[in-house]
Image (tube, grey):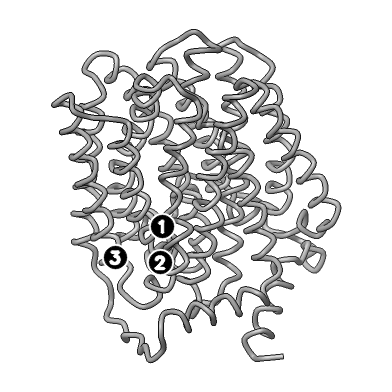
Amino acid sequence: MSKLSKETEIISENILDNGEKDSSPEKPKLSWQATFAALSHRNYRLWFIGQIISLFGSWMQMTAQGFFIYELTRSPAFLGYIGFANGIPTWLFMVYGGVIADRFSRRKIMIATQTIMMMLAFILAALTFTNTVEPWHILLLTFGLGIANAFDAPARQAFVNELVPREDLLNAIALNSMMFHSAAAVGPAVAGITYAVLGPGWCFTINGISFLAVIYNLFIMKFPPIQKRIVNKSAFKELQEGLQYLKTQKMILLLMLIISFSTLFGLSITTLFPAWAVNILHGDAVTNGFLQTSRGIGAVLCSLFIASLSKYIVRGKILTTGLISLPIFMILFAVNSSFIISSFILVGIGASIIAINNLSNGLTQTLVSEEYRGRIMGVYSFSFFGFMPLGALWIGMLAEHFGSPMAILINAVILLLIYVALNMRYSRLRIIK
C-alpha cells in the first residue's frame, strides 16, 4: 500500500470514529461567531458578498427563463430540453475542468468564466428587449452557459479551501450553501414580481449586472505567494492519475453516487415548477417564483443548522436522514394541489436536498488529498451537474406522457428504493462524523 493510501485510510478511520474513544465530548456552543466563523477571514468575506449578489441575479434569470420558455412553447418537454442543453458541456468538459483547476490559478479561472456568463446574460436580455428571441436562441445560450460552468464549478468547489483554514472548511461550505439558497429564497420571488411587472428582459439584465460584484471581489482578494505547481504531464495523463486515485477512495465514490441519484431523481423536480405553477396550481410567473422561494427557505434553514453545529454534528446521521426524507416529501408534493401545502412541503424538500449536498461536499473535501483536490472536485461537480440535464430530460418526458404529478411520484419511489438499498448496504455511513 502506498504512503498516500495509508494516510487516506487513517483519515477515513478518524472520520468513521463514532466517538466512543472520547468519553466527554465537547458540548455544542451556539453563537453567531460559531455560525459565521468563516466570515472572520477577509478573502472568504469578499467571496461571500460577491457570490450572494451574483447568485441573486442568477436565480432571477433561472426562474424567469424557465417560465419564459414555457410561455413560448407551452411544452413541459422543452423545459427538459433546456436543462439538457445546459448539462451537455458537463459531460464533455467538466472532468477536464478539474484538471485545469489543479494546473492554473482558480481565481483567474473564475474571473474568466464569470465574465463569459455575464456576457451571455446581456445577450439574452438584448434579444428579449428587441422581441427577436426564439426558443433555439435560449437553447444555444444555455449551452454556452453550460460550457462556462463546466470550468467554473470545479475551480469554485476547490477554491473554498484557499479562503479559510482547515478547521473552518465545513463552516465555509455550509455558509456557501446558505448564501446559494438565500439567493434561491429571495431571487425567484423577486423574479416573479419583476417578470409580471417589467417583463423577463429586466430579469436577465439584473443578472448580467450582478456578476460585476463577484468579478470585482475576486480581483481585490489578497493571497500569500505560493509556489507554482510544475506541470510536466499532459492533461489526459493528469486526469488518468486523478481517476486512479479516486478508485482507491471508496467513501468518496459512495458520496458521488448519492449526489448523482439525488440530482437525477430528486433535484430534477424543479424543472417542472413552471408547468406545475400553471397546470396544477393555476397560477402564473409569481406562483412559479414562490415555489422556488419555498424550496430556498428550507435550504437556508438547514444550511444555518449545519453551519452552527458543524463541529458537533454526526454528519452521517444528518445525511441519511436527508436521504430518506427527500423522497417522502416528494410523494407528499406529488399528491396535492394546494399552493399553501405545496409551499410547506417544498421547505422540507429544500432542507433535505441541502442536507445531502452540503454534507456530501464537506465529507469529500475532508477526505481528498490536496494534490488531487481540483480533479476530484471536478468529478464531484460532474456527479452533480452531469446528472442535472439527464434528470431534466427524464422528468420532462415523463411529465409530457403521464402528467407532472405522476412524473414526480415515479421519481420519488425510485429514489426511496435506491436510498433504502444504500442504507442497508453501507450501514457505516450513518456514523460518519
Q: What amino acid is found at the position of numbered circle 1 in the picture? A: Ala
Indicate left or right for 146 with 266 as reference.
Answer: left
Horizontal side of 210 relative to 266 (left or right) equals left
From the top left corner, tell me how far across and down residue 238 is, in percent: 47, 81
How packed mark 3 is, by other alpha carbons closer than 10 Å (few <14, some 14-19, many 20 or more), is some
Name the residue type under label 2: Gly
The CA distance from mark 2 to mark 1 is 8 Å
Q: Who is closer to the viewer here, 84 or 270?
A: 84
Q: Which residue is mark 3?
A: 109
Please give the name of the residue rendered at 15% of the width and 33% of the height, measured from the top-left corner: 126
Coordinates of residue 383 in the picture (x, y in percent): 56, 56
Q: Quadrant of the C terminus?
A: bottom right
Residue drawn at x 38%, y 17% as measured from the top left: 285
Tag 2 and tag 3, C-beta contact below 8 Å: no
Instruction: Pick the residue in front: 157 or 394.
Output: 394
From the image, tell me which residue sits under label 2.
Answer: 97
Q: Which residue is mark 1?
A: 153
Q: In percent of the image, x 45 and y 70: which residue is there?
A: 374
* First along the sequence among labels 2 and 1: 2
Give SS at disc 3. helix
Instruction: Residue at 36%, 19% (x, y): give it.
Output: 71
**350, above or below 378, in the image:** above
Residue 197 screen position, x and y as percent: 24, 13
The tag earlier along the polypeptide, 2 or 3, is 2
Query: Closer to the observer: label 2 or label 3?
Result: 2
The residue furthest right is 424
Circle 2 Cα neighbour tier, 10 Å, few/some/many (<14 / 14–19 / ≥20): many
Whether residue 359 sits left or right of residue 66 in the image: it is right
- Amino acid identity at mark 3: Ile
Looking at the rendered image, the quarter that the N terminus falls into is bottom right
Dot 2 and dot 1 residues touching (CB under 8 Å): yes
